[in-house]
Amino acid sequence: MEIFTTLLYIVFVLAAIVLVVVVLLQEGKGGGLGGALGGGGEAAFGVGSSGINRFTGWVAVVFLVSALGIHILNNRQGTQSVVGDDGSVITAPVDGSEGGEQ
């Protein structure tokens, strides 16, 4: 199960990077970063191409699904909260003895 979580984190980070780059390459009203780079977005995707919009949508779906998957898997692992049942914060022991509450 830990390998699947690690794989989801890798997919999540890669999708985030690709999503940022693809969004910046799209030409908006002001030209965006694509215009600043000498029209690299137009050369790669073509002028007026709907393919870049479709690709951006699919990358966004992968990003959101991986984020939800990470959230669900982390909740199922049952990690302990840093806040105790009575609302007090659980602290780590300084002297190496067993931990306690403040």
Image (spheres, grey):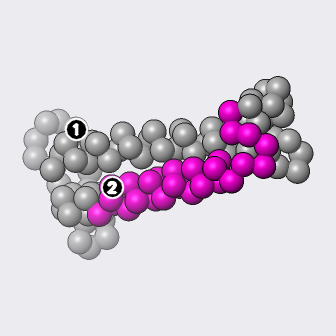
Give the amino acid at mark 1: Val
Residue sitting at 38 percent across and 54 percent down?
Answer: 66
* 48 relative to 71, above or below: above
The Cα–Cα distance between marks 2 and 1, rounded to whole angstroms, is: 32 Å
Disc 2: CA contacts within 10 A as few (<14), some (14-19) or many (>=20): some
Q: Nearer the viewer, residue 99 or 72?
A: 72
- Classify 10 Å Cα crowding around label 1: few (below 14), some (14-19), many (20 and above): few
Q: Is residue 41 shown left or right of residue 9?
A: right
* Residue 91 place in picture, x, y as percent: 26, 50
Q: Where is residue 12 in the image (x, y as percent from the top left)?
A: 42, 46
68 inside magenta stretch: yes
Residue 67, x across and y down, in percent:
41, 56
The total number of labels drawn is 2
Report the front residue among 4 and 88.
4
Disc number at residue 38? none
Q: Is the magenta stretch mostly helix, strand or loop?
A: helix
Magenta extent: 44-72
- Of circles 2 and 1, the one toward us is 2
Residue located 88% across and 50% down the image: 29
Residue holding disc 1:
94
Q: What is the residue that sits farthest to the bottom in this orientation?
A: 86
Q: What residue type is labelled 2?
A: Ile
Q: Which residue is drawn at 51% across and 44% down?
A: 16
Mark 2 and 1 residues: CB-CB less than 8 Å, in contact? no
Within the image, what quadrant is residue 80 found in? bottom left
Q: In which quarter of the image is residue 82?
A: bottom left
Disc sitting over residue 70 in the figure: 2
